[in-house]
Image: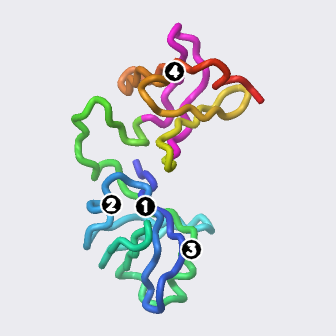
Amino acid sequence: MDVVVGRVAKAHGITGELAVDVRTDSPEMRFAIGATMQAKLRDGTSRSLTVSAARPHAGRLLVRFAEVVTRDVAEALRGTLLLGSTDDLPPNDDPDEFYDHELEGLTAELVDGTKIGTVKEIIHGPGGELLVIIRDQGEALVPFVREIVPTVDVRGGRVVVDPPEGLLDAD
């Protein structure tokens, strides 16, 4: 299974370097020299890329890929999603830590067992993580904190949500 590990924001400089918005907790592994990843371009095509250099810069990574040697090629990659395999992830031994792909697709239910929807994705924002739950009434954004999401049962295929009053009310 592939997961998004970054998104190309723009070309940087004239030699094909790319500014990448990182979407992984392990950029040092995902963007290590020699690491390969699939690039899913905006037109739907894919190609393989090999990291030849990476360095932090202004909240992003500046990444050089062996296959991208000019600014024109780099510009064509703007908006490209960079995908890594979940097979490359180290095992997670912390019971309170989860990879995004482990949570996506889990059933969301209330403490009493009432199903309220399905976890679509996890948004990583400056204020913390949010679970995006698809409901019959649309999407609900639920802060991913222990007080509101007391139970995550990946093997059982569910997350338990104990929302404060009004959190799940439709607008």
User: Secondary structure beneath disc 3?
Assistant: loop
Q: Which residues are magenta?
A: 103-123
Residue ranking furthest to the top: 112
Disc 1, disc 2: CB below 8 Å? yes
Of the two numbered discs 1 and 2 on the same chain, state the one appearing first in sequence. Answer: 1
Which of disc 3 and disc 1 is earlier in sequence?
Answer: 1
Find residue 77 and report its horizontal and vertical position in percent: 54, 75
Measured in 3D between alpha carbons, the distance from the residue under mark 1 to the one under mark 3, in whole angstroms, is 14 Å
Residue type at the position of mark 4 = Val
**Which amino acid is tagged 1?**
Val
**Cα gap from disc 3 to disc 2, whole angstroms:** 19 Å
Reading the image, the residue beneath label 4 is 161
Distance between mark 1 and mark 2 Cα atoms: 7 Å
- Identify the residue under disc 3: 78
Distance, label 4 to label 1, CA atoms, is 28 Å
Q: Looking at the image, is mark 4 or mark 3 nearer the viewer?
A: 4
Residue at 28% across, 52% down: 88
Residue indicated by mark 2:
27
**Callout 2: SS:** helix
- Tell me, yes or no, whether the two marked residues, 3 and 2, touch with CB atoms within 8 Å: no
* Quarter of image, res 166: top right
On-image quarter of the C terminus: top right
